[in-house]
């Protein structure tokens, strides 16, 4: 029988980063992505957080250094993200302000 994993949910991005990402990075210094893999996509959800009264899901293939960029932006602004529609305009994604959209390695999507 497989173990049921409860996906954590955080009240905001800052709390998500401090409680989920920082401990992961400290325990695994060489880890590049949240899932510990080097490449390949996944739709596995690492965690949820709230931003602008919406719940957002962070996919496990998101790069830790991109999360750090967004976290560092919180020192200068309360709005580190841009909300962008997906290609089909049926859902939304977050992008880090000032970062390129292509090859962003930042996979955060609206959770409904």
Image: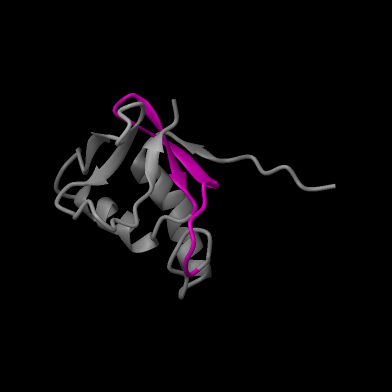
Nearer to me, 47 or 37: 37
31 relative to 71, above or below: below
Residue 59: give x, y in percent of width and height. 46, 48
What residue is drawn where x is 14% and y is 48%? 76
Res. 99 image quadrant? bottom left
In the rendered picture of this protein, how many numbered marks are placed on residues? Answer: 0
What residue is drawn where x is 44% and y is 45%? 58
Residue 83: give x, y in percent of width and height. 24, 34
Query: Quick check: 52 left or right of 44?
Result: left
What residue is drawn where x is 29% and y is 58%? 103
99 relative to 55, above or below: below
106 relative to 8, above or below: below
Residue 111: give x, y in percent of width and height. 44, 30
70 relative to 37, above or below: above
Nearer to me, 44 or 48: 44
Residue 46: give x, y in percent of width and height. 52, 48
Nearer to me, 95 or 88: 88
Q: Quadrant of the C terminus?
A: top left
Res. 63 image quadrant? bottom left
Figure coloring: one colour
Residue at the limit of the structure toward the front, as seen here: 88
Q: Which residues are magenta?
A: 38-60
What residue is drawn where x is 29% and y is 36%? 87
Nearer to me, 91 or 87: 87
| Residue 20 part of the magenta-drawn span | no
Query: Quick check: 28 left or right of 88?
Result: right
Residue at the limit of the structure toward the right, as seen here: 1
């Amino acid at each position: 029988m497989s173990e049921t994993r409860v996906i954590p949910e955080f009240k905001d991005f800052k709390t998500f980063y401090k409680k989920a990402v920082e401990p992961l990075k400290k325990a695994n210094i060489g880890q590049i992505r949240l899932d510990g893999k080097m490449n390949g996509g996944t739709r596995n959800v690492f965690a949820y957080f709230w931003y602008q009264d919406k719940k957002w899901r962070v996919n496990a293939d998101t790069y830790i250094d991109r999360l750090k960029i967004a976290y560092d932006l919180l020192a200068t602004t309360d709005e580190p993200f841009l909300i962008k529609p997906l290609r089909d305009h049926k859902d939304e994604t977050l992008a880090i302000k000032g970062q390129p959209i292509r090859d962003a390695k930042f996979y955060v999507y609206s959770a409904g």
